[in-house]
Amino acid sequence: MFSLSKPLALPPQLEWKFAHEPELLGWTIRARNYNTFVANCMFAFMSVVLVGLSYFLYSTPAGDEDVLYRLITSLCFYVIFSLVIASMTHQRMNFAFRFTQSGVECCNWKDFPEWALTFLKWLTALTAIFFIFMATIDPFFLLGALIGPGGLGLTYLSMAYSKSYRDMHTQYHHLIYEWKDFTQLAIATNREVVDLKFTHFDKRLGRIVNWSLNIFCRRKQKHDVAEFIKPFLSPGVPFIKAKVNVPLSTD
């Protein structure tokens, strides 16, 4: 029924509660668990602002800088801040869903983006080599080597060795629901999501919680997933199609 790519490995910090029960259906996926329209608009707006700032940096030299030097500096400025903005507006969370006779489990986690460190490290090395080479032609590029690669290097060090930064970009959550908890099933019309509203007692919060579980699906799978879920729900639970606003979390 489903065409799935290579599954994500569940991290050791998370494990299934109903692992002793046969899995009826399960998959993993990387998804943006927030309002993507707003995030995309923010990224587009900030990209336009960055283009303007980069052009201003290029067109207003502080001295007798070479045109190539100003171009490289402006480009580095744009690339660095574009990466910073993209890391905030285009983050993806890892999700693993598992369905059993007892209910639904969702593990979601966000690992620290090691790829960003690798990219920054190579970008720093390449720009340093370039500026050192250009300094053999014009010693003024030695200043550029301090500003460009130096700034990239400091960014790399702050990301690699800052515990608070790593903690901010690392998350682990395990959500567990019984079939009787769900009060509505909805197929999202605006995203590849099946939405399950639920009411249950949250032991961590110590109170009754009314919220939604967003089941992120791959393209053209949400209808099949919804039809699979429907027989497990209590009689009379509404099954609708509606626009779904993806919440940040169920905390």
Image (tube, helix red, strand yellow):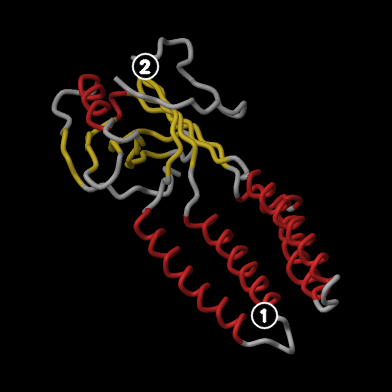
For image coordinates 59% across by 85% down, the residue present is 59
Quarter of the rendering occupied by the C terminus: top left
Above or below, 78 relative to 207? below
**Label 2, label 1: how many angstroms apart (C-alpha)?**
64 Å
Residue 81, image x and y in percent? Answer: 59, 65
Observer-nearest of 64 and 24:
64
The crowding category of the residue bearing disc 2, from other C-alpha atoms within 10 Å (few below 14, some 14 to 19, many at least 20), is some
Residue 197 quadrant: top left
The crowding category of the residue bearing disc 1, from other C-alpha atoms within 10 Å (few below 14, some 14 to 19, many at least 20), is few
Q: Amino acid at mark 1?
A: Val
Quarter of the rendering occupied by the N terminus: top left
Residue 53, image x and y in percent? Answer: 55, 78
For image coordinates 46% across by 72% down, the residue present is 48
**Circle on res. 100:** 2
Tag 1 secondary structure: helix
Observer-nearest of 128 and 4:
128
Above or below, 102 relative to 72? above
Q: Amino acid at mark 2?
A: Thr
Tag 2 secondary structure: loop
Above or below, 167 relative to 182? below
Q: Which residue is mark 1?
A: 67
Kindly indicate whether the residue at mark 1 contacts the one at mark 2 (C-beta within 8 angstroms).
Answer: no
Residue 235, image x and y in percent? Answer: 15, 23
Tell me which numbered mark, 2 or 1, is placed earlier along the sequence. Answer: 1
